[in-house]
Amino acid sequence: DAKTTQPPSMDCAEGRAANLPCNHSTISGNEYVYWYRQIHSQGPQYIIHGLKNNETNEMASLIITEDRKSSTLILPHATLRDTAVYYCISSGSSNTGKLIFGQGTTLQVKP
Amino acid sequence: GAGVSQSPSNKVTEKGKDVELRCDPISGHTALYWYRQSLGQGLEFLIYFQGNSAPDKSGLPSDRFSAERTGGSVSTLTIQRTQQEDSAVYLCASSLVGTAGKNIQYFGAGTRLSVL
């Protein structure tokens, strides 16, 4: 399974875009990239996922590089409620869909 | 619609006692997962159910841990002879399909287990 690497922490000003990077240089062709976040004392929340193409939904955008070795999650207008730990996860070679969480990036949105 | 429901939300027990944690997945979701999150640690996978079968139990830390799922719905995680190192938040997730692609998992709020 592909290992993902994320910076341990980032700050972002409220109202600005938050760009969270993730490296997954060993990802294979059929592995998806998933992003989840965990707000303090809550269960993880799905944000977005992608395979090759960039994706956008009501929460965020996902930009995947052409070689698929890295991706960036973009929260276009961060709010204080976006303060959370963000996890970048590859779907892995397993056919069970289990998620292998790393340490994630703690995003602190500041007023 | 209802999300994933877990009970109890908090459980305090004494070392050596058995505990049961319950998970009610989203209706119609065939895949169910258990994870745990220890203080200061990341989330670790415990077990995966597809229907009532558990094809992947690789994350269960010891034979004191077991889980079952009945009727393709409710699941129970049982920890026997609890130890202090079992203290953690136990999270349950469900998804429509349990395959590697397009597998969006919805998590419950978790059960916080404290072993004294």
Image (cartoon, rainbow, N blue to C red):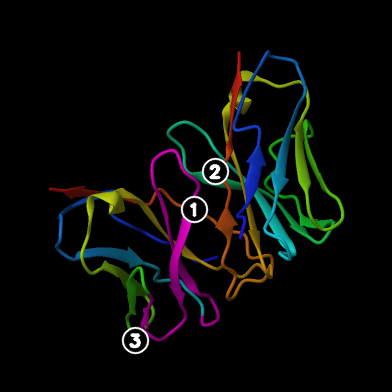
Label 2, label 3: how far apart the Cα atoms are:
36 Å
In the rendered image, residue A51, in percent from the top left (x then y), is placed at: 47, 81
Is residue A37 on the magenta stretch?
A: yes
Look at the picture and state if A35 lies above or below A57.
above
Q: In terms of image quadrants, where is residue A4?
A: bottom left
Disc 3 is placed on an element classified as loop
Left or right of A20: which side holds A100? right
Q: Amino acid at mark 2?
A: Ala
In the rendered image, residue B72, in percent from the top left (x then y), is placed at: 82, 58
In the rendered image, residue B59, in percent from the top left (x then y), is placed at: 67, 46
Which residue is more in the foreground, B77 or B1? Answer: B1
Disc 1 is placed on an element classified as loop
Circle 3 chain? A
User: Mark 1 Cα within 10 Å, few/some/many (few <14, many 20+)?
Assistant: some
Q: Amino acid at mark 1?
A: Phe
Look at the picture and state if A95 lies above or below B112.
below
Look at the picture and state if A87 lies above or below B19.
below
Left or right of A38: which side holds A28? right
Which range is magenta?
A: A29-57
Instruction: Indicate which label's residue lies in the foreground, 1 or 2.
Output: 2
- Label drawn at residue A66: 3
Label 1 sits on residue:
A101
Look at the picture and state if B106 lies above or below B7.
below
Disc 1 or 3, which lies upstream in sequence?
A: 3
In the rendered image, residue A110, in percent from the top left (x then y), is placed at: 15, 47
Label 2 sits on residue:
B109
The residue that appears at 61% across and 60% down in the rendered structure is B1
